[in-house]
Amino acid sequence: QQPVQSPQAVILREGEDAVINCSSSKALYSVHWYRQKHGEAPVFLMILLKGGEQKGHDKISASFNEKKQQSSLYLTASQLSYSGTYFCGTERGDSGYALNFGKGTSLLVTP
Amino acid sequence: DTGVSQDPRHKITKRGQNVTFRCDPISEHNRLYWYRQTLGQGPEFLTYFQNEAQLEKSRLLSDRFSAERPKGSFSTLEIQRTEQGDSAMYLCASSLEGVHPQHFGDGTRLSIL
């Protein structure tokens, strides 16, 4: 089942913050976050494991709310380089670690 | 560490022709995944391998699609009798076994005339 991402798109000015949400109707073990720039391959950002863990690097962090089966990606003090489409991926099931990806959230950071 | 490489980068073919794509994963990665991505959508799972074994194949995947990973190294994805709806970016990714990041190649863009 495909996770649901919100919002679909967001426009920010440089330095502003944004939150991207990823929700699933089934129990999650992990949530994977990727960023894809136009014409390029998706690039790994981070993996969140169940347990409500919060991770981050630089000014991008994420949380995983096991009760709500939801993960949120936080981008603080956004930079122009943050522009792109953000995808969350959730595991397909017990058989392995291939991912179901959401439709993506398009983020544009303007000067 | 050379990343995941895919060949060709672009493929244009006529409807009804067969096409084959190749993916070379990161050398120490034993898991290899194929995804398909169309404009405005996230990557859609097609199939994945652990070493040479194909462990899962999407139910949405037509019988015209077949993938192999001989000797657990590179993988090929073949599409027979291509149709207009097969036009997409075909992405390959690889990872270590377990919950690890998947590293994507730049993809093969397939256009069906």
Image: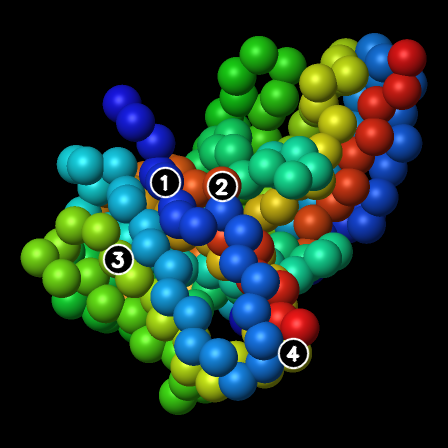
Label pair 2/4, CB-CB below 8 angstroms: no
> Residue A3 is drawn in which quadrant?
bottom right
Q: Is residue A93 left or right of residue A103?
A: left
Q: Circle 3 sits in a helix, a strand or a loop, which is it?
A: strand
Pointer 1 indicates a residue of which chain?
A: B
Q: Circle 2 sits in a helix, a strand or a loop, which is it?
A: loop
Give me the C-alpha separation between circle 2 and circle 3.
15 Å
Label pair 3/1, CB-CB below 8 angstroms: no
Residue at x 59%, y 81% (from the top left corner): B15
> Residue A32 bears which disc, if any?
none
Q: How is the image coloured?
A: rainbow
Residue A93 vertical position relative to residue A60 in the rendered view, above or below: below
> Residue A34 is drawn in which quadrant?
top right
Query: Pointer 2: what residue?
Result: B106
In the picture, which quadrant includes the C terminus of chain B? bottom right
Pointer 3 indicates a residue of which chain?
A: B
- The amino acid marked with disc number 3 is Ser
Query: Pointer 3: what residue?
Result: B75
Query: Pointer 1: what residue?
Result: B5
